[in-house]
Every structure is written in structure tokens, then in C-alpha cells.
């Protein structure tokens, strides 16, 4: 993820020149405000103590409390949380919600832990970071390999330390302890709303054909939502293979197959392409929903789609971005396309503060308004500066963060 942070800095430098950003603001955006590194002792089932290293990065809070997920993954690192916290600051600014950017993580493969060990680690992480998080300072959420159950454990641990109920300290919680309706699929739902706006701009016919890279929570939910809205999912790939059906895949049946076998590979309802990539398939829309840097200069020219919706964080390298711009492909960048999750997390905070909870239809109505507005505000910047969507999104976000910093006398 070191390269990801370098990519962020390169984009920030470009925006600085385009909008004439003051040095006093720019220099403060080159590094996070704080990165806390912690060591978490956990008594394992065999009776031995194992130490897990964790992090919490807090990038910028000029527009509001830090906000960002906690991931449990073997590849978590200082550079990774630093980069992801920067993207979160841009993401919350792009959609205009009053939050900053943060990110956390623990170096662990949670699949190797028992449920008791996982709970101990989750509670231990909160014990280690509780002094710098809170409903009005820094609000974590689930991320890679964390889920509502883990958020529930962390919430409970925080409230035990605080001695009172503070449900707004964490989002992505189970519904029974203050979670929000629609949060579980909000990233994909937000992706649908910006996809619809992009299709209008490109005058694309509906229904469209779609290929999806990655079939985890985000990829599956996106496929399901798109299929429900009449679009045809013709190819899906994961780390073990690619399946194609030009007549359209049965998304739920494919998901059941993956749950049973661990991969989309060898699915009976499609042609198996082995390790050939879904990028190569003829389709109107491509949705990268897996890992960063999946689309690079070595495969960008193979892409047939005219519209890319980045549901993953950082799936396209800067070199590939340039190729796709030359090819006339419209890329809706991650800091907008996958911002539905943090937007509904914000709604969850609001509901926690009120002690009053909205129906699912109300959450979706508010989400659609915010995502559609953000897309069109970015489009205005795109036209004004004659740049691609990613640069336009960075411009909008940095301008908003800079104004908040100036209003606070930080310039």
C-alpha cells in the first residue's frame, strides 16, 4: 500500500496546481494528523499469549470527526491504513457529509482464529484505541474481514470502559443495538445510484450488460442489485477463476455455489474461463469490486467496457488511468462510487444521536439524493477543469477540506 499513498500524493500535487491550493493547506495534507500503533495481547485457546499489531490512522478532521473502517487482514500495515485514511477524508468530503477520514486495522488472518479468540482480539483492539475514538472524535466501522458481530463486541467493550451507552461510537452494528437499515448493502446501492447518473451522461441504453471482478460482499450485492434493476450480469471473476454466461448469470445461484465451494469457478450455469479475466469480456459496464491495483498498464487495453464503476478501493493504477482516458472509458472513481457505505454509516450516527430510527425506504431515499448530487457536482468540476472524473472528484473534495481548514484558521 506504499504505492497507494504515493498515488494519493501524486493526485494531491496535481490538484494543488489546478486549483492553486495554498502551501499552508497543502503541506498539512501530506501526512495523517496521527497514526497510533498498538500491540494487543490475546490468550489463545492453547493457553499461550499471542501479540497482534494494530493501527488507527486519523488523517484529517477539519470537516468533522474522523471516520473509517477497521480491517482484520494479514497485509494490514502502517502504509495501508495511512493511504486508506486519506481516501476516507476525500470520500466524506466528496459526498458532503460532516466527517473526516480515518482507518484502522490489525495484522491477522481472522479465519485462523476461533470465535473466542476473535472476540478477545476485537475487544483488545478497542481497549487499545478507546482513548482516541468516540462519537464526537473518531467513529470506526467494519471493513475487510470484519462485520456487524465484531462491531457489536467493540461497541460493548467501549461502553463498558465508558460506563454508559454510546451507540454512536461505532457504525455497521447489528440492527438490535443501533445499526441502520440498508447498511449491509449500502456500498453497492450507492454504486447503483452513481451508475444510473453515469449512464444518463453517456446516453447508454438500459438494461446494460455488466461484468464484475470480485464476488465478496460488495461484488455480490452489486450483482444482485443490478440484476434486480434489470441489468444483465454476464461475467463474474474471483481469485480462482472467471465464469461467463452471455444470457445472464443467476446471481443468487452463483453466490450459493461460491458459499459451498469457496469460488465462482466450476459453476454449472456458466462457461468456465479458468484464469482468463472478466475484463476481456464484451460488456457495457465493468465493476471492479476486489483488490487495489487490479487494473494496470498490462491489462487496461483489454477492457471492452465504456463505463467503469470502482466499487473497490484503488483498483486502477495511475498508468492504467491514463490508458483508459485515452480509450474514452468513463471511470467513476472509488471515492464517489463506493461512498454509499460511509454515507449510510453517517445516517447511523445521526439515528444513534436522535435515538430514532428510519425505515429502509427513507434511508435509501436519502442515500440516492446524496449520491446523485455528488455525481453531478463532480461532473460540473470535470467540465470546468476539462479533466477526468477522478481528478474532478479530488478537486471537489480538496476544495471542501481546504475551506474547512481555512475557516478554522489553519491556513
Image: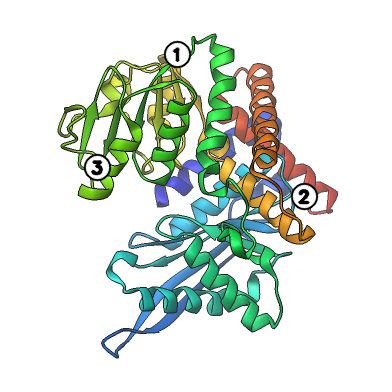
Q: Nearer the viewer, residue 216 or 38?
A: 216
Mark earlier in primary sequence (3, 1): 3
Which of labels 3 and 1 is toward the front?
A: 3
Please provide percent x and percent y for residue 120.
43, 79
Q: Quadrant of residue 44?
A: bottom left
Q: How crowded is mark 1: few (under 14 residues within 10 Å), some or many (20 or more)?
A: few
Residue at 35%, 17% in the rendered image: 283
**Number of dots carrying numbers:** 3
Residue 257 numbered tag? 3
Q: Residue 405 carries which label?
A: 2
Mark 2: few/some/many CA within 10 Å (<14, 14-19, 20+): some
- Left or right side of 321 for 394: right
**Whether residue 22 can be seen here:** no
Asked which secondary structure carries label 3, the reply is helix
Name, please, the residue furthest toward the bottom. 47
Q: Name the residue under label 1.
A: 328
Rendered view: 109 above or below 275: below
Q: Report the front residue among 181 and 200.
A: 181
Asked whether residue 325 appears in the rendered view, the answer is yes
Which residue appears at 44% of the width and 17% of the height? 329
C-alpha span from label 2 to label 1: 36 Å
Amino acid at each position: 500500500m506504499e504505492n497507494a499513498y504515493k498515488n494519493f500524493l501524486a493526485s494531491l500535487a496535481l490538484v494543488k496546481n489546478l486549483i492553486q491550493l495554498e502551501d499552508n493547506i497543502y503541506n498539512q495534507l501530506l501526512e495523517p494528523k496521527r497514526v497510533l500503533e498498538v500491540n494487543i495481547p490475546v490468550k489463545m485457546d492453547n493457553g499461550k499469549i499471542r501479540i497482534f499489531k494494530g493501527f488507527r490512522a486519523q488523517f484529517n478532521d477539519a470537516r468533522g470527526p474522523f471516520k473509517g473502517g477497521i480491517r482484520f487482514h494479514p497485509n494490514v500495515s502502517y502504509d495501508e491504513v495511512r493511504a486508506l485514511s486519506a481516501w476516507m477524508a476525500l470520500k466524506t468530503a466528496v459526498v458532503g457529509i460532516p466527517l473526516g477520514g480515518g482507518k484502522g486495522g490489525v495484522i491477522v488472518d481472522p479465519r485462523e482464529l476461533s470465535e473466542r479468540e476473535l472476540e478477545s482480539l476485537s475487544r483488545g483492539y478497542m481497549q487499545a484505541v478507546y482513548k482516541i475514538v468516540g462519537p464526537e472524535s473518531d467513529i470506526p466501522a467494519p471493513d475487510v474481514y470484519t462485520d456487524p458481530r465484531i462491531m457489536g463486541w467493540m461497541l460493548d467493550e467501549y461502553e463498558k470502559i465508558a460506563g454508559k451507552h454510546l451507540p454512536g461510537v461505532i457504525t455497521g452494528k447489528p440492527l438490535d443495538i443501533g445499526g441502520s437499515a440498508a447498511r449491509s448493502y449500502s456500498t453497492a446501492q450507492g454504486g447503483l445510484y452513481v451508475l444510473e447518473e453515469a449512464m444518463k451522461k453517456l446516453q447508454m441504453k438500459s438494461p446494460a450488460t455488466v461484468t464484475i471482478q470480485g464476488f465478496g460482499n460488495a461484488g455480490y450485492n452489486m450483482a444482485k442489485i443490478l440484476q434486480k434493476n434489470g441489468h444483465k450480469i454476464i461475467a463474474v471473476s474471483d481469485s480462482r477463476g472467471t465464469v461467463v454466461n452471455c444470457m445472464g448469470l443467476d446471481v443468487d445461484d452463483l453466490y450459493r455455489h461460491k458459499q459451498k465451494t469457496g469460488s465462482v469457478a466450476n459453476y454449472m450455469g456458466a462457461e468456465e474461463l479458468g484464469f482468463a479475466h472478466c475484463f476481456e469480456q464484451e460488456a457495457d459496464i465493468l465493476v471492479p469490486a476486489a483488490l487495489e491495483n487490479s487494473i494496470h498498464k498490462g491489462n487496461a487495453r483489454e477492457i471492452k467496457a465504456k463505463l467503469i464503476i470502482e466499487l473497490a478501493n484503488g483498483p486502477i493504477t495511475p498508468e492504467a488511468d491514463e490508458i483508459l482516458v485515452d480509450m474514452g472509458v468513463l471511470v467513476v472513481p472509488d471515492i464517489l462510487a463506493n461512498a454509499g457505505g460511509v454515507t449510510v454509516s453517517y445516517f447511523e450516527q445521526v439515528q444513534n444521536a436522535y435515538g430514532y430510527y428510519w425505515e429502509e425506504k427513507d434511508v435509501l431515499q436519502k442515500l440516492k439524493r446524496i449520491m446523485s448530487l455528488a455525481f453531478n457536482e463532480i461532473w460540473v468540476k470535470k467540465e470546468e477543469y476539462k479533466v477526468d472524473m477522478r481528478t474532478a472528484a479530488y478537486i471537489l473534495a480538496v476544495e471542501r477540506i481546504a475551506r474547512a481548514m481555512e475557516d478554522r484558521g489553519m491556513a
